[in-house]
Each structure stands twice: as C-alpha cells, then as structure tokens.
Amino acid sequence: MSMVSTVTVTVPATTANLGPGFDCIGAALTLYNQFKFINLEAMPSADGGQTERLRIKVSGAEAQLVNTSTDNLVYQAFVKLYEHLEQTPPPVEIEIELGIPLARGLGSSATAIVGGLVGANQLAGKPLDVTEVMKLAIAIEGHPDNVVPALLGGCRLAVKGCNDEASKLGDWEVCDLHWHDNLVPVLGIPNFELSTQEAREVLPAEYTRADAIFNIAHFGLLLRGLETGRGEWLQTALQDRIHQPYRQKLIPGYNAVLCAAVDAGAYGMVISGAGPTLLALTASSQGAAVEAAMTSAWKQEGIVAQVRALSIDTQGTILI
C-alpha cells in the first residue's frame, strides 16, 4: 500500500479595493485560514467497501456555516485544478480551520479558492507553477484583487495584459506595491454578513467621465501614499466614487465609525472588499487610539464588532 499524501496550506486574509482601487488592488493581512488535504486513495473504508470520495471537517468560529458537500468552495477549486490537468481528482479529506470571518469583506472565499488550488497542485506533484495557479484562481474568483495577495502576500496590483486572448486563463501583469512600515491597517469587523452579490447589485451600470477621472487621480495618489506613508496624501487618496458611495448604506454605523476613526487620528477609512468590514489607515503611533475609537463607535450603534490592528502579511500562501 502506498503512503497517504498529506498537504497543509495556510492562506492569509485580504483587504481589497482600498478606496479607489476597485477590483484591482489588494493586500494580505495577518489573519489566516488553514486547509489540510489528505489523499484517501490508499485508505480503504472501514467496511472494506469503496473509498469515500470526499470528507470535509471544519473547525473554528462560524464552522457550522460552512458547506461540507461537494459544493464546498475549497473542494470546487480542488477539482478545478485536476480538470485543468485533465485528470480525475483523488478521493480527499479536507480539514478546514477557520480564522477569518465569513462574508465580511476579508477574502474568505479567496482563501478557499487559493487553498483548494494549492492543495490540489501539491497532491498532483506540483505540475503548475505559481503564475498558472494564480491565473486559475483569478478565473474562478472573477477578479484578482483578493486571490492575488492571498497567494503571493504583500500589497498587489493586478492588471489585465495586452494579450488577454493568448490564454484561456487570461494574461495578467502583477505588480508588488510597497506598503510603508509606519502605516497600520485597523479592521472593524461587525457581527453581520454582507454578500458580495448584494454589494455588487447596488453599483450602477455606468459612471460619468468626471467620476472616472476622479478615481484615476485618487488611485495614483493612493499608490504614492501607501509607498511613502504620507498622511495628507492618504486623506485625499482614500476617497472613491465607484463603489463606496453606493455600499455605505448597506453598512449600519458607517458614518459614525468613520468620524470616530478620523477623530482618533486615522488618515481615512474605506470599505474592506465588498464589506461590511471597515478598514482605517493610520500611523502606528495612533493605532491603539483608532482601534479604541472604532470599537466605541460600533458599540454606540448597538453593533458588536471585533476591531483589530493588523499587519501586512508578506509571505502569502505557505505550505506546512
């Protein structure tokens, strides 16, 4: 009997958009989900019958909310990689340890996609390089802003290349962006969910030229603000006209938390991903004050929230 192959993959949370960087920029955070894959091919069932095709076990907060059937997103990504290889996926046990809240705008679905792809790639003998895995992840997710930093770590800008028709998975240029060491992300994670679909449905189908120009200019300033840590640039750069004005109404307490964060010294606040998590950017010296102010503001709105000052994860997905 051959040895059972086991792979453990740790994937960081991500925050995407960062104001004007809608659907193209994201950063990995020091908050993690872990996925363990056990190849059951060599493990006979207890009754001597055929091996189970799939077992999924979930632990951690909100574990009861995770689908444990073949519709599970981790397994869907796992299967997708084998389909890409034109191979049959092996029977597998997947153990999921949740450290990232679900449906909160912190890239939990991106961790599932990246975790499933990387786990499958390892069990298959690593036939795909990291770029090929990344392209598969983008194709599954539909946009790059979460899956790219989840896989690679750091703060990343992903742009469709000129030769997009050259590959069925698309042609992507990925740029590593410098995040200043003195710049702290403070996350306010409320105890209610907001689906990405709901958050996208409130967006308009068209924008004015003025709004497009506004976002292009502010996105350019955002890149320089992240690189230099200059607060006066970030105060302006975090403004947006593409998604945040429409999504704010879906997040109770948004204005109160924004005012509290800025009054405590934050340069500004944005919606993390599709929300409802709110992300304030501040100097490290003001991190504790901003964290306390956001906590108090949520509480005054009658909303329970976790507020945490985190760091940028620079490693991305790792194998244990």
Image: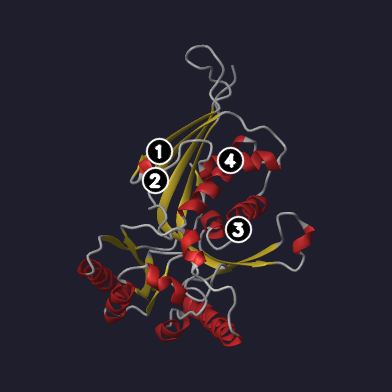
Q: Is residue 277 above or below residue 60?
A: below
Q: Which one is in front in this view, the residue at disc 3 or the one at disc 2?
A: 3
Residue 184 in sight from this viewpoint: no
State the separation of the CA atoms marked 3 and 2.
23 Å
Tag 2 and tag 4, C-beta contact below 8 Å: no
Dot 4: what SS? helix
Q: How far across and how far down the image is residue 110, in percent?
A: 51, 53
Q: Which part of the image, by quadrant, shows the N terminus? A: top right
State the separation of the CA atoms marked 1 and 4.
16 Å
Q: Amino acid at mark 1?
A: Val
State the separation of the CA atoms marked 2 and 4.
18 Å
Disc 3 crowd rating (10 Å Cα; few below 14, some 14-19, many 20+) is: few
The answer to whether 225 appears left or right of 78 in the picture is left
Q: How far across and how far down the image is residue 157, in percent?
A: 58, 68
State the separation of the CA atoms marked 3 and 1.
26 Å
State the separation of the CA atoms marked 2 and 1.
7 Å
Tell me which corner region of the image, top left, top right, bottom left or bottom right, holds residue 297: bottom left
Q: Amino acid at mark 3?
A: Gly
State the separation of the CA atoms marked 4 and 3.
17 Å
Q: Which residue is mark 2?
A: 98
Q: Amino acid at mark 2?
A: Leu
Dot 1: what SS? strand
**Residue appearing at x 37%, y 39% in the figure:** 59
Q: Which residue is mark 3?
A: 142
Q: Is tag 2's residue or tag 1's residue first in the polypeptide sequence?
A: 1
Q: Which residue is mark 1?
A: 58
Q: Is residue 217 above or below residue 57?
A: below
Tag 4 and tag 3, C-beta contact below 8 Å: no
Dot 2: what SS? strand
Q: How far across and how far down the image is residue 50, in percent?
A: 57, 17
In this rendered view, identify the residue nearer to me: 159 or 67. Answer: 67
**Residue appearing at x 55%, y 54% in the figure:** 151
